[in-house]
Amino acid sequence: MRFQSDFLGSRKAPSGVRNVVFEGYRCRNKTYKVYGYGTSDSTFREPRKSGWKRTGQGRMDLSRRQLGQRYLCSDLGFPYTKKEILSRIQGWDQVPIQADESYFLPGYQ
């Protein structure tokens, strides 16, 4: 039984710089863990602190909360399958989203 979803997120800053992060999200307790950050030489670097953290209510966690609630996790706290996640993302124009220019792809397990 799966209890988390891993994903790769990319966000374009107003300056034009693209930020890439690889994270895990646990549906049961709404926590996340950063596995690595993308670098300009197309590699990943590990974060300084790499523990599981609770998704907060602030603006910085808005896209994580929406990702978990709308695309990764069922109402019962279980992660959707890759097929279900892709289906939900492909229909995202029908699901209201408030994150600013965030695009997410499910990770492979």
Image (spheres, grey):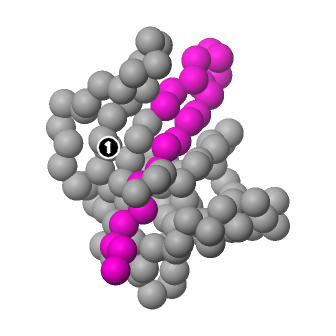
The secondary element bearing badge 1 is classed as strand
Q: Of all residues shown, which one is farthest toward the front? A: 109
Q: Is residue 91 left or right of residue 10?
A: right
Q: Of all residues shown, which one is farthest toward the right? A: 94
Where does the image place residue 70, in percent across and percent down from the top left? Answer: 60, 68
Where does the image place residue 88, in percent across and percent down from the top left? Answer: 69, 67
Relative to 65, residue 3 above or below: below
Quarter of the N terminus within the rendering: bottom left
Residue 95 lies in quadrant:
bottom right
Identify the residue under disc 1.
Answer: 34
- Which residue is nearer to you in this view: 57 or 52? 52
Tell me if I can see residue 100 in this picture. yes
Question: Which range is magenta?
Answer: 1-20
Q: Residue at x 36, y 74 (%)?
A: 2
Chief SS of the magenta region: strand
Q: Residue at x 45, y 73 (%)?
A: 79
Quarter of the C terminus within the rendering: bottom left
Residue 46 lies in quadrant:
top left
Q: Is residue 71 left or right of residue 1?
A: right
Q: Residue at x 52, y 42 (%)?
A: 9
